[in-house]
Amino acid sequence: MNEGDRPLDPATLAVHLGRPPARSGAPVNPPVAMSTTFRVGGAIEYGRVDNETWGALEAAIGGLEGGRALAFASGMGAVTAVFETLPTPGRVVVAGDAYVGTREYLSDVAGRGRLRFRTVDVADTDATLQACAELAEGPARPSGARGQFGAGGLLWLESPTNPLLAVADLDALVAGAHALGMDVIVDNTFATPLLQRPLSFGADVVVHSGTKFIAGHSDVLLGLTVTARDEVHELLRIRRTLHGAIPGPWEAWLALRGLRTLAVRLERAEANAAELARRLSAHPRVERIYYPGLPSDAGHERARAQMAGFGAMVSFEVAGGAAGADAVVAALSLITPATSLGGVESLLERRARHPGEEALPAALLRFSVGLEHVEDLWDDLEQALAAPF
Ligand SMILES: *Cc1c(COP(=O)(O)O)cnc(C)c1O
């Protein structure tokens, strides 16, 4: 397929990876392998352990991220599988505004004495590494040395974070955490493998909520882990098999189908996000905006250096506190007031209404910018921002 030495562009790989072998008469798409059991003597015996349709999705995501992927029933299925590999008691440094489910899980297991964790502002490299040094406590390992996965603790990054869009310096944090003997995980849900490849910065594991941009249509729950370390891949595979957090074959197939259009969806959504962020930042009712694509954003330079684009998530605070923000959401007519993100349709919600999100600014609105025409989105935002409060 390749012309000369130039590697295929990720946008092309997203279309082509995970297809059946190119044989005459072969289907162009992988089958949805709806069977729980398989005749003996083959590579797959039981449907909780492996499935051909998962394999196609895993080949595609693994190829894009530069490692080996495993599909899970949900993003949280993938997130918890990683934490469950930790020897007890685990030690974790985590982004303070990491996905709320990730933090709730950590509080839950910490409450049962199985690990200790600290939250940090991952945009602050020095503070993050300081927290790592305090929690790691172990003997420093020479740079590049590897012990049992997670034995030296985990640094759990999101970048950009959900929902404050903070950008972590992946190069510096991976190197610093590794020097302390810690392993580094990056939740790459907001960036997708098309905008950021954390394994290329040395991260040990990438996790995704495939529910979001990868599947892309708000109709599938799915999660993924990706790692270039074979022994870590095997640890995660064991977690998946024993915990049973497996995706249905149909869900895996839909996620792969979503991936085929990820590049064009992102292109449109990101262009919309950039334009709407620019307009929102000049709107009198908007008090603060968070979007790494804006040159004024604290994470702009870093995002430019380590990402191939700024993504389609925009957060902003409006005047009038929680009531003011609720009034804006209630006045929307085109943009859907709903949680979640990464679908073709624009979604917007006030995050602090959720339990566990009370530390966020009360008037923070998280906006998942979709594929509608940008002027239709702006008209709706403008009339909603005029709502009395
Ligand atoms: C949604 C989300 C998750 C959890 O994924 P589910 O598919 O809902 O289980 C994890 N991380 C981030 C950043 C998310 O946005």
Image (cartoon, helix red, strand yellow):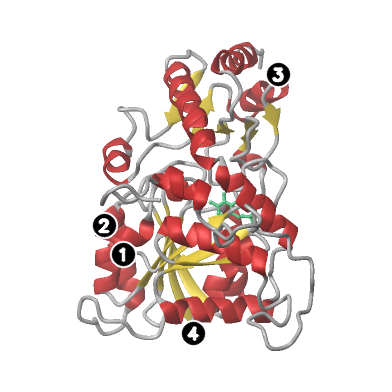
On the question of residue 292 being in view, the answer is yes
Q: Of discs 4 and 1, which sits in the foreground? A: 1
Looking at the picture, does residue 84 appear above or below residue 362? below
Residue 91, image x, y percentages: 44, 75
Residue 140 x, y percent position in the rendering: 24, 81
Task: Count neighbours of disc 1 (C-alpha within 10 A) and say few if under 14, some if 14 to 19, many if 20 or more.
Answer: some
Going from the N terminus, do you reach mark 3 or mark 1 first? 1
Residue at mark 2:
171
Question: Looking at numbered disc 1 in the image, what kind of residue is underneath it?
Answer: Gly
Q: Which residue is mark 1?
A: 202
Look at 40% across and 44% down and name the residue there. 195
Q: Quadrant of residue 18?
A: bottom right
10 Å crowding of disc 2: few (<14), some (14-19), many (20+): some
Q: CA distance from mark 4 to mark 2?
A: 26 Å
Residue 39 vertical placement versus 105 (above, below) = below
Q: Which residue is mark 3?
A: 331
**Which is nearer the N-term, disc 1 or disc 2?**
2
Q: Secondary structure at mark 2?
A: helix
Q: Tell me what residue is drawn at x 46 percent, y 26 percent.
A: 271
Q: Is residue 211 visible?
A: no
Three-letter amino acid code of the residue under disc 2: Asp
The answer to which of marks 4 and 1 sits earlier in the sequence is 4
The answer to whether the residues at label 1 and label 2 have Cβ atoms under 8 Å apart is yes
Name the residue beneath numbered marker 4: 87
